[in-house]
Amino acid sequence: MPVTDGIAVSEPPVIPGVRRSFSTARGVRFHVTEAGPVDGRPVVLLHGWPQHHYAYRDLLADPPEGLRIIAPDLPGYGWSGPPPHRWAKEDIADDVLALLDALGLERVLLVGHDWGGYVGYLMVLGRPERFDGYLALNMAHPWVPATTVLRHIWRFLAYQPLLAIAGVPLQQRTRLLRRLIPAAITDRDAVDSEVVRIFADRFRDPVCARAATDTYRTFWLREIPQAARNPERRRATVPVRALFGLDDAALHPSLAAPETARADDYTFEPVTGCGHFIADERPDLVRARLLELAAATT
């Protein structure tokens, strides 16, 4: 898969043994990567920015026994087509729910990281009957008090407004992501330069660059004001397990604190010596917690 600087990655990275397909749902042509038995218990994995399905390469390359691992690229990310909207998170949640319908998946285990983690929360709040359990990776839960958000808003201001304003040229024409991804990783030996390139260079594609920019533009222009006016009141009835790398510079662990979670069954596990990209740094731990959640929700 030869790539030079300035050229978008044109083909998905090789993961031995996976099945790849495209499925259209709500106007989005989803690229879906799967592994494990087709009749296994379905587990849907949602990535965030600046990544795609390859964030879960370890689970895809070596799926746990009996589990069907399903990792779609979110709309406009990876090798999925662009969404017919501006990446409002509720729209993305509806897109992914429609994909579950298209794949014939009535009820699944869910894993979500970063923006995929926030979309996951919206899905389990809106359609709890579709989910056995939810493993959230380094993402704020949707019930964070405004006072807590304000204490940590400087973390968002450090990069998000810039992406919302000029995300397309920044991702396409600079080495921003080649620098940002390693900076957010504590164990540099866990993620080599080739993996960083596989993620970063995909956002040189205009569809991906646009989707990522819209992710943050919509967040700042629409979703932050909406959350201030109408904070999340729904209560999670699906078991939620939050796994959080404590070295995350973008998100403080207080944004996922169990004390403020409106949930019947919510646990928070801090992970020392780990940054934001926990599935990349600690795939063994993510696998272990997924298996525990699967065992507890049979």
Image: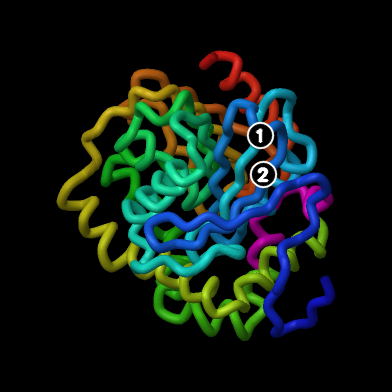
The answer to whether residue 255 of the structure is visible from this angle is no
251 falls in the magenta region: no
- Which of label 2 and label 1 is nearer to you? 1
- Say which quarter of the image contains residue 61: top right
Q: Sort mark 1 into few (<14), some (14-19) or many (20+) by Cα contacts within 10 Å.
A: some
Q: Give the image location of residue 152, x and y in percent.
A: 40, 51
Q: Give the image location of residue 90, x and y in percent.
A: 32, 51
Residue at the image point whose x is 70% and y is 70% from the top: 178
Per the image, label 1 sits on a secondary structure element best described as: loop
Amino acid on which the number 2 mark rests in the picture: Glu
The answer to whether residue 234 of the structure is visible from this angle is yes
View extreme (left): residue: 229
Q: Which residues are magenta?
A: 180-191
Instruction: Tell me the quarter of the image containing the N terminus.
Output: bottom right
* Viewer-side residue, 252 vs 196: 196
Q: Which residue is mark 1?
A: 38
Drawn side of residue 171 relative to residue 142, left or right: right
Residue at the image point whose x is 63% and y is 54% from the top: 21
Q: Are marks 2 and 1 in contact (CB under 8 Å)?
A: yes
38 relative to 171, above or below: above
- Say which quarter of the image contains residue 183: bottom right
Amino acid on which the number 1 mark rests in the picture: Val
